[in-house]
Image (cartoon, grey):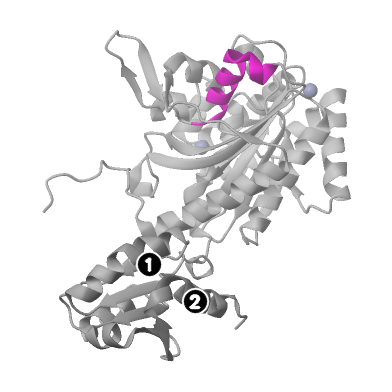
Amino acid sequence: MPTFKTLKGFKDLLPEESFIWESLASTARETFDLYGFSMIQTPILEPSDLFTQSIGTTTDIIEKEMYTFKDRDKSKISLRPEGTASVVRAYLEHPTLSQQPYTKLYYIGPMFRHERPQAGRLRQFHQIGAESIGEINPNRDIEMLALLVHLFEQWNIAGLTLEINSLGCPVCRPPYRQQLVDFLTQAIHALCEDCVRRLQTNPLRILDCKKEGCRAHIGKAPASRDFLCLECDIHFKAVEEGLHRLNIPYVVNRHLVRGIDYYTKTAFELTTTALGAQNAVAAGGRYDSLIQTLGGPQVHAIGFAIGLERVAKLINPETIQPNPLMLFMAPLGERAHMLLFPMLYAFRRNKVKSELGDRNMNLKRQLKQADHFKARYVLIIGDDELGSGYAVLRNMVTREQQKIPLVTLVESTIAKIVQKADRPE
Ligand SMILES: [Zn+2]
Ligand SMILES: [Zn+2]
């Protein structure tokens, strides 16, 4: 038994997974660049009030999931439970960000919530997120949705459903909220304990309850879509129109809500059934009041976040493989080792992924190692080869062997290897 293990709800990311993550992240970075988004990295620790003031005190995140500590100077600090609040904090802190007509940022990194690990939830999970700050134009909503869909296409993940809704604004949401409370109050005996409490604090969240008793009533509940003010209605229709024009399939989910209070107008999720029950792999929405809430000017914004763990589960690992070991060098004895030792670094500097075998092992054992590393080629040098002036280059797939002159070992080997690798199969 090892002395130390990871904390409950935390996990190590091992190489067989991390290369999938790296591949996802690198595709994401390329795609974000195409849409004019730049990367931002905010700290993992922030003042607790940043999150309580933005996410909403009656949300699950603030009520029971946030990691909050007292720092040595007694100030309250929290591990970030999501990315948007930190990006907005940075936007307001740095004039270089807010002095542009609009600001497009993305981030990739860990988030922390005290979730229940028995339900398969991690307490440190990872998100790829994007924020477009500065405009209320529905074209910004459409751009975000198009970008999100494009990203999943780039990742070769199919079978997703884009669900959209409008949550209204400070003008039209209060009357809707009252209608919803009135409706659900009639069914209060069927609601779960959490939802009875939410009826007072956060009634929209009831629409997201997964318990059967609640679900039976939610289907007939009034929908925000029917209560939108003229401005919200025009905005939502423009978003729908844009999606049609771009041929992006979507469904309107009239009861779609988000677990965070700052969302206004457009809200959306990308869902799949590939991971069991209907699951969101990405979600987001417009947050037109958040920047003001955090002490800034009236600036409109929209963003999304993608769950990296869930996306990684949708990837077939066969389709993403790490770069193979191109060359394994097998020195038979001390003299061969002396010759090959500097060559190892010469090959690596020439972008050939290579390893050097152990001179004390016989050829059979070294070839076994090369197989273990899945090496494409093995370069063999023993006393015979040193005498003849030629090394043996063996293709590990075809078992074909050829001679390589020792005087031009690096150049000649690279010529053979690259030539082979470039030839279409
Ligand atoms: Zn409205
Ligand atoms: Zn419920």
Does the numbered disc 2 mark a residue whose Cβ is under 8 Å from ligand 2?
no
What is the x, y in percent for residue 261? 59, 24
Image quadrant holding the C terminus, namely bottom right
At label 2, counting other C-alpha atoms closer than 10 Å, the crowd grade (few under 14, some 14-19, many 20 or more) is some
Q: Quadrant of residue 54?
A: top right
For label 1, the residue is 354
User: Disc 1 marks which amino acid?
Assistant: Ser
Q: Label 1 CB, ligand 2: below 8 Å?
A: no
The range drawn in magenta is 82-98
Q: Position of residue 224 (x, y in %)?
A: 74, 31
Q: Note whether 247 is above or below 143 in the view shown.
A: below
Q: Which residue is mark 2?
A: 417
Disc 1, SS: strand
Camera-side residue: 117 or 157?
A: 157
Q: Position of residue 173 (x, y in %)?
A: 72, 22
Quadrant for the N terminus, please.
bottom left
In the displayed structure, 242 sits above or below 195; it is below
* Residue 109 vs residue 40, the one in the foreground: 40
* Residue lying at 33% horizontally and 67% vertically, measured from the top left: 355
Say if 247 sits above or below 368 in the image: above
Q: Is residue 89 magenta?
A: yes
Q: Is residue 321 visible?
A: yes
